[in-house]
Image: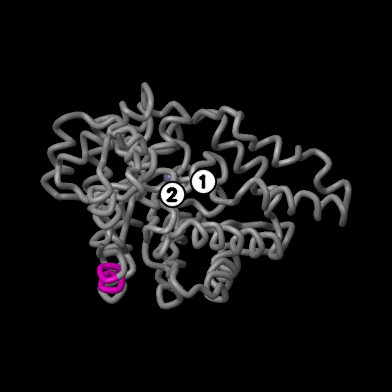
């Protein structure tokens, strides 16, 4: 009897696409630890209040949506707050995805203003893009999505779209709406998303991530922005599900993140992946914040195979199903169709 839930499938070497990965949340604890050490060596005071990332982000650490967002503003951003460390950590993230068998990556990041380091939002975007372009990979293509944070003002959202348009020929492919689901009023982002779409940028939105961000009004408003893809898609009322299915929207589903942060009830087998699998919406498994969640993309496929009893053929099919929803253009889709066909 075959007791291997993967039936011999090598999920790591299987070519995969990752469409929902936040840059700062994807930095491994090991990389953050290295940055922490070098900061302490250079200036003991600079990291004095920051605990060791290997402890702060230990696998046993439990986060929920209340403790998760301050982790960025008060900790990871504090560690990666100069050009050298932003570049170093970005490179490390790219290497980790490549080592995990990712062949197409859409990283996303909120343009950061880091006053004490003299880094403007534009300089930050340039820095991330130049790090991506100098990362030589024989197999992995990386694109960038600029995120609008729910706490942003209308002007800040507009600025993110300006930057996305200005750097689209250097690898920016779209705009995202992210951030603490308990914060913000999404109505104010209508014009920013409209302008992004009018100018040919792709759009994705964190959708129904928490109960607080899943009111009928909010979800209808977000759908009226006409997103190309939506992420998480957890607390969705039936009438909204119908719209999503009718539009065949691309879905970015983040299994381990949802279970570990208790965004969904129950365990892996209770995840809404199974519901959406039967709807015809293209699904892409994504890690969201692998540095904090601790489950690589290959492991997400292993979990899916294990908990939902998918055969290797179905796992390959799932890995390919997001190709048509990538933001990287037709040539890239064609490359992936060839590469991921088994
Ligand atoms: Zn996310």
172 shown above or below 262: below
Does the segment drawn in magenta span residue 334? Answer: yes
- The chief SS type of the magenta part is helix
Q: Position of residue 57 (x, y in %)?
A: 64, 37
Residue assigned mark 2: 297
Residue assigned mark 1: 290
Q: Position of residue 79 (x, y in %)?
A: 71, 50
133 shown above or below 222: below
Q: Position of residue 90 (x, y in %)?
A: 59, 61
Does the segment drawn in magenta span residue 329? Answer: no
Q: Secondary structure at mark 1?
A: helix
CB at disc 1 and ligand 1 closer than 8 Å: no
Q: Residue at x 67, y 49 (%)?
A: 30
The C terminus appears in which quarter of the rendering?
bottom left
Q: Is residue 248 left or right of residue 20?
A: left
Tell which circle, 2 or 1, labels the residue nearer the N-terminal end: 1
CA gap between label 2 and label 1 equals 8 Å
Q: Which residues are magenta?
A: 333-338
Cβ–Cβ below 8 Å for labels 2 and 1?
yes
Neighbourhood count class around disc 1 (C-alpha, 10 Å): few under 14, some 14–19, many 20 upward: many
Neighbourhood count class around disc 2 (C-alpha, 10 Å): few under 14, some 14–19, many 20 upward: many
Where on the picture, by quarter, is residue 218? top left
325 shown above or below 333: above
Where on the picture, by quarter, is residue 233? top left
Q: Position of residue 209 (x, y in %)?
A: 37, 35
Q: Secondary structure at mark 2?
A: helix
Q: Is residue 41 left or right of residue 62?
A: right
The N terminus appears in which quarter of the rendering?
top left
């Amino acid at each position: 009897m075959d007791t291997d839930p993967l039936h011999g499938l090598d999920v790591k070497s299987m070519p995969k696409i990752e469409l929902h990965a936040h840059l700062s949340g994807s930095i491994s604890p090991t990389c953050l630890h290295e940055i922490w050490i070098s900061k302490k060596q250079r200036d003991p005071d600079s990291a004095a209040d920051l605990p060791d990332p290997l402890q702060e982000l230990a696998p046993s650490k439990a986060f929920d949506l209340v403790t998760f967002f301050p982790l960025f503003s008060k900790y990871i951003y504090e560690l990666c707050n100069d050009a050298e460390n932003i570049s170093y950590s970005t490179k490390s993230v790219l290497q980790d995805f490549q080592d995990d068998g990712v062949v197409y990556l859409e990283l996303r990041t909120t343009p950061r203003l880091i006053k004490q380091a003299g880094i403007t939002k534009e300089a930050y975007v340039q820095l991330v893009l130049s790090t991506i372009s100098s990362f030589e990979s024989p197999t992995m293509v990386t694109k960038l999505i600029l995120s609008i944070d729910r706490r942003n003002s209308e002007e800040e959202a507009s600025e993110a779209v300006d930057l996305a348009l200005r750097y689209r020929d250097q690898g920016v492919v779209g705009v995202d709406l992210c951030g603490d689901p308990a914060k913000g009023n999404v109505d104010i982002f209508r014009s920013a998303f409209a302008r992004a779409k009018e100018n040919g940028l792709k759009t994705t939105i964190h959708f129904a991530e928490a109960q607080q961000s899943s009111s009928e009004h909010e979800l209808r408003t977000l759908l009226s922005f006409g997103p190309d893809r939506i992420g998480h898609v957890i607390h969705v009322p039936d009438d909204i599900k119908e719209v999503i299915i009718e539009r065949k929207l691309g879905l970015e589903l983040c299994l381990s993140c949802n279970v570990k942060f208790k965004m969904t009830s129950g365990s892996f087998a209770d995840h809404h992946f199974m519901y959406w699998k039967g709807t015809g919406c293209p699904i892409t498994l994504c890690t969201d914040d692998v540095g904090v969640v601790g489950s690589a993309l290959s492991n997400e496929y292993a979990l899916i195979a294990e908990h939902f009893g998918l055969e290797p053929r179905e796992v390959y099919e799932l890995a390919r199903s997001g190709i048509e929803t990538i933001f990287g253009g037709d040539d890239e889709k064609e490359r992936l169709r060839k590469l991921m066909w088994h």
